[in-house]
Amino acid sequence: MIISVSGAPGSGKSTFACRLADALGWPRYYIGGIRREQAAKKGLSLAEYNKLGETDPATDREVDDYQRELGLKEDNFVIEGRTSWFFIPHSLKIYLDVSEEEGARRIFSDLQHNSNRNEEEGLNSVEAVKESTKRRLESDNLRYKQYYGIDAYNPSNYDYYFDTTNISRDEAFEKVYEFIKSRLDKPSV
């Protein structure tokens, strides 16, 4: 089984995907991390790289082709990416959501402890993060619709939707993991 994890910025996707991969003993692929590395190699922040992608489809297609190939060649892994559900349609698709305010608060907190995120400059408040997140969502939606005709943030594309706004990381993990375990116990159709 392949499990794809997507969702809103700050919803806990990375924390969840890491923990899930550990619990299952499976590899985890982090598409956002690959994009961040690609941006850094070009001397760009992730926001600048996303903006470049609005006119240069290669910035998305490289990682999207990589995802598609993984889905065809491997099994039993967790993949975290906003378009993973689309490029690996046979995956179990998980969507984690969070309110805009809470997502921005979580990202801001992470930025205080993690300088390796390759984010744009000036994210020195929750409000600045919220504005940056809005721009990112606009860029994502523009690129995904333009190149693939999809809305990666539409919960109806997923097998399981879960809002993490008002619960702890542990509670969110347990609830979503319970759903995944119920699917792991069933034979494939």
Image (tube, rainbow, N blue to C red):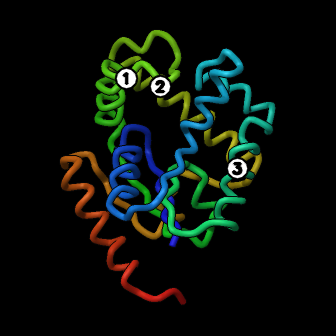
Name the residue tied to disc 3.
64
Disc 3 secondary structure class: helix
Labelled disc at residue 127: none
72 vs 12, left or right, is right
Name the residue tied to disc 1.
114
Cα distance between the residues tagged 2 and 1: 7 Å
Cα distance between the residues tagged 3 and 1: 26 Å
Question: Does residue 174 appear in the picture of this structure?
Answer: yes
Tell me the kind of residue under disc 3. Asp
Disc 2 secondary structure class: helix
Q: Quadrant of the C terminus?
A: bottom right
Residue lying furthest front in this view? 25
Disc 1 secondary structure class: loop
Labelled disc at residue 117: 2
Q: Please name whichever residue, 185 or 133, is drawn nearer the observer in this view of the structure.
A: 185
Q: Position of residue 88 (x, y in %)?
A: 63, 64
Looking at marks 3 and 2 on the same chain, the residue that comes earlier in the sequence is marked by 3
Q: Residue at 62%, 42% (x, y): give it.
A: 141
Q: Please name whichever residue, 167 or 153, is drawn nearer the observer in this view of the structure.
A: 167
Cα distance between the residues tagged 3 and 2: 20 Å
Tell me whether the residue at label 2 lies in contact with that at label 1, contact meaning CB atoms closer than 8 angstroms.
yes
27 vs 146, left or right, is left
Q: Where is residue 148 in the image (x, y as percent from the top left)?
A: 74, 53
Q: Where is residue 12 in the image (x, y as percent from the top left)?
A: 35, 44
